[in-house]
Amino acid sequence: MGGFQEKNVTCFCLLGAEEGGWSCCSHTCCWESGQLQLLGLSIATLSTVTHYGLHFTLISNISLESNSYRFIHYAAFYFGICLSMTLILAALLSSAATVRESQCLTAMGFLCFALAFCGLIPAACWRYMHSTEVEDSMMDVYDFVYEEVRRNSSSFRRHELTAIHEAFLCCGKHSPFGDTSNVEHKTCPSGQIRNAGQDCLQEIRDFLRKHMDFISTLLGVTIGFMVYGMILTSFLWFSIHFSNNLDRKGKYILRER
């Protein structure tokens, strides 16, 4: 006859080391995984809407040698798509690690969180230190197109200026270089001519300020999730590690009759 001795298994959870803590860890990871997937899809949707939205594509597609907004436009899109893919991958790895109790998958999930965090911090710092650069670059493009139309009435530039007026529902700007009524009557939509002289630069600034405030809020929420994800995957890794070290198998002892 052989005897079998089985050891009690405990694991560490986010709230501490307790009996049955693995259930707490797994439920928390599954909840966070679902939230991360929603966050990743939200960022991907926002990046796509920003990249292909009419207000943004009009300014980006204007052919200028020094269109600084075009670089920001494409950089923000690719950054947002890469970030959303990283978040979704981190969520899937965390779910798989919880189900399979795999230290390797948990470590990979932690690296995804850390990678996203390292990308978000410079983005947040850039947004803080260059808080008006996006607005200024778009207004510079509008200002250049407007002055081109005022000076030489280029049909190509006039078409671009008309499209901007229709998109932002504004009409002209206050110019120190002379009368602008001729430009506004040629480029403003029929419903906006009565508002001739309305400053489109102010309209562009207000529109972008609301959009960038929403992006800043989303950046802050995402950074918080990354910190939480790194902490949770760290506890999950240690939970699996100590659970394996406690050795569930026990020992068989053979005795002669």
Image (cartoon, rainbow, N blue to C red):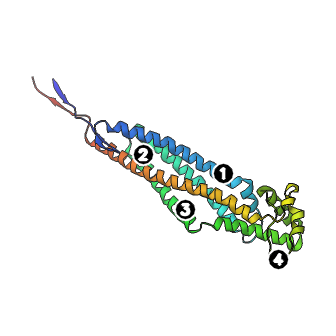
- Tell which tag, 1 or 4, sits nearer the viewer: 4
- Tell which tag, 3 or 4, sits nearer the viewer: 4
| CA gap, disc 1 and disc 4 | 38 Å
Q: Taking 138 as reference, is 189 left or right? A: right
Q: Which mark is residue 123?
A: 3
Residue 255: image x %, image y %? 12, 27
| CA gap, disc 3 and disc 4 | 38 Å
Q: Which mark is residue 177?
A: 4
Q: Are marks 3 and 1 in contact (CB under 8 Å)?
A: no
Residue linked to disc 2: 105
Q: Taking 208 as reference, is 123 left or right? A: left
| CA gap, disc 1 and disc 2 | 30 Å
Residue at x 48% of width, y 47% of height: 90
| CA gap, disc 3 and disc 1 | 18 Å
Residue linked to disc 1: 48
Mark toward the start of the polypeptide (3 vs 1): 1
Mark toward the start of the polypeptide (2 vs 3): 2
